[in-house]
Image: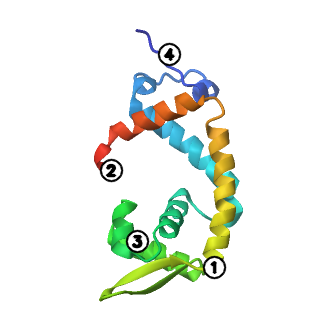
Amino acid sequence: MTHDKKTPAAEEDAGIDFGLLPSLIGYQLRLAQIAIFRDFARTLGEHEVSPGLFGVLVVIESNPGLKQTELAKATHLDRSTMVSVIDKLEARGLVSRKQAAGDRRSNALQLTPEGTALLKKLKKLVAEHEKRLSRHLSESDQAILTRLLQKIFPEHR
């Protein structure tokens, strides 16, 4: 099996040999991640919401009253990072913290009405973003790709 040593994006890097990189899953995932994040930023840029913040908002919306520690675990963030994320979202008026029922040491999270309204807009924009990303994939290809990616680190599901 021969490997094309130039990636499509590398054509502008005339003369650069990428060696075995194009055959590595991690390298291809990184190129895909860069493209995805760039498109995400262009799509949602005016709202100043990263893919990570979008994910946090979606999980909070889907689980009102979720504790910060549970959210940190669900989003694979450490507790101190989660505190900073929630501080940012709270300062923007998108999320509120209330004392968790029966646990004075924990905060239960929920979207504010402003957070709910913004997330509704963001979901539409993210749907457009996803449509652009998958424009060259059939529904079957999308399902296969998702299933294969989930096999890489099944313990994170």
Q: Is the C-beta separation of discs 3 and 1 under 8 Å?
A: no
Q: Which residue is mark 4?
A: 4
Q: Quick one: label 3 or label 2, which is nearer the N terminus?
A: 3
Q: How is the image coloured?
A: rainbow
- Reply above or below: 43 against 26: below
Circle 1: is it few (<14), some (14-19), or many (20+) Cα within 10 Å? few
Mark 1 sits on what residue?
113
Q: Secondary structure at mark 2?
A: helix
**Mark 4: which secondary structure?**
loop
Q: Is residue 13 visible?
A: no
Amino acid type at mark 2: His
Name the residue located 54 percent from the left edge and 34 percent from the top edge.
142
At label 4, which amino acid type do we have?
Asp
Residue 94 is drawn in which quadrant?
bottom right
Real-space Cα separation, disc 2 to disc 4, in angstroms? 32 Å
Residue at which label 2 appears: 156
Residue under label 3 = 82
List the single residue furthest toward the top.
1
Q: Exactly how many numbered labels are in the figure?
A: 4
Q: Earlier in the sequence, mark 4 or mark 1?
A: 4
- How far, Cα to Cα, is label 1 from label 2? 31 Å
